[in-house]
Image (cartoon, rainbow, N blue to C red):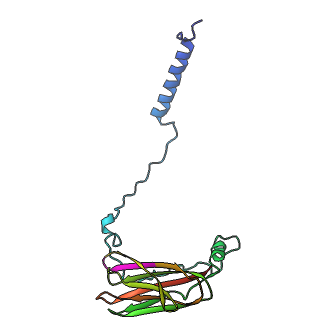
Amino acid sequence: MNVFAPNPTRRIGGLLLWICVSSLIATGCAPKKPPAQVEEMRQRSVTEDPAVRGEFPNDWLVPDAGAGLPHTPPEDSEILEFYELFEKTRTPGLVEAELAPGATRTVPLQVSGPSGLAGAVRWIGTTSPLNVTIALGGSTLATGTAYHYGQNRGGSYVRTQTTAGGLANITVTNTSSATVKVNIVFMATAL
């Protein structure tokens, strides 16, 4: 028996099926889909974005940032892990200042024993690097690594470890010829 031999019944069934489907589509009996709504929008070019061009507002704050967020996290929140991870971390908070050329700002923090110290300083007003140092009891432990971005912004990161407690501080000196706004974050984590 030849399996691939023409089968008149199969041929007639396929022909009838093709005729039925064609007639349904032609007569409009097939289900209709509503026409798609096309909405055209002009998208701003990336080169028109002020941040891409390096044009930033002359301030740090974002209006209404965090508005409506709960003050205490729920019990099953991942934020509790964050609190536990940083429960030995102390900071004097965010310090903002305006520094004239040659001016210095120091932020102190008392540490009770061996600690990891970290600081981040950002500035608006120049791309020139400013001097940033961390000291303990008057002895310099580390100096910052500077970076810059945009037309008039920069920053510096610095971190180190202490072997004892004492008065730690981070110092920023404006070595540029421009007046700058600085934003200083300094923290110590007990080891």
Q: Which residue ends up furthest to the top in the rendered image? A: 1
Establish if 176 lies above or below 81.
Answer: below
Which residue is pictured at 48% across the width and 89% down the height? 139
Percent across and percent down for residue 148 are: 35, 76
Percent across and percent down for residue 91 are: 56, 86
- Front residue of this view, candidates 144 and 183: 144
Which residue is pictured at 66% across the width and 76% down the height? 84
Q: Main secondary structure of the magenta part?
A: strand
Establish if 30 lies above or below 45.
Answer: above
Percent across and percent down for residue 17 are: 53, 24
The quadrant of the rendering that contains the N terminus is top right
Q: Which picture quadrant has residue 180? A: bottom left
Which residue is pictured at 46% across the width and 92% down the height? 106
Establish if 149 lies above or below 27.
Answer: below
The quadrant of the rendering that contains the C terminus is bottom right
Q: Which residue ends up furthest to the left in the rendered image? A: 177
Q: Is residue 171 magenta?
A: no
From the viewer's perspective, tell me whether residue 131 is left or right of residue 119: left
Q: How many marks?
A: 0
Q: Which residue ends up furthest to the right in the rendered image? A: 75
Establish if 45 lies above or below 132.
Answer: above
From the viewer's perspective, tell me whether residue 118 is left or right of residue 87: left
- Front residue of this view, candidates 119 and 165: 165
Q: Which residues are magenta?
A: 151-157
Q: Is residue 155 magenta?
A: yes
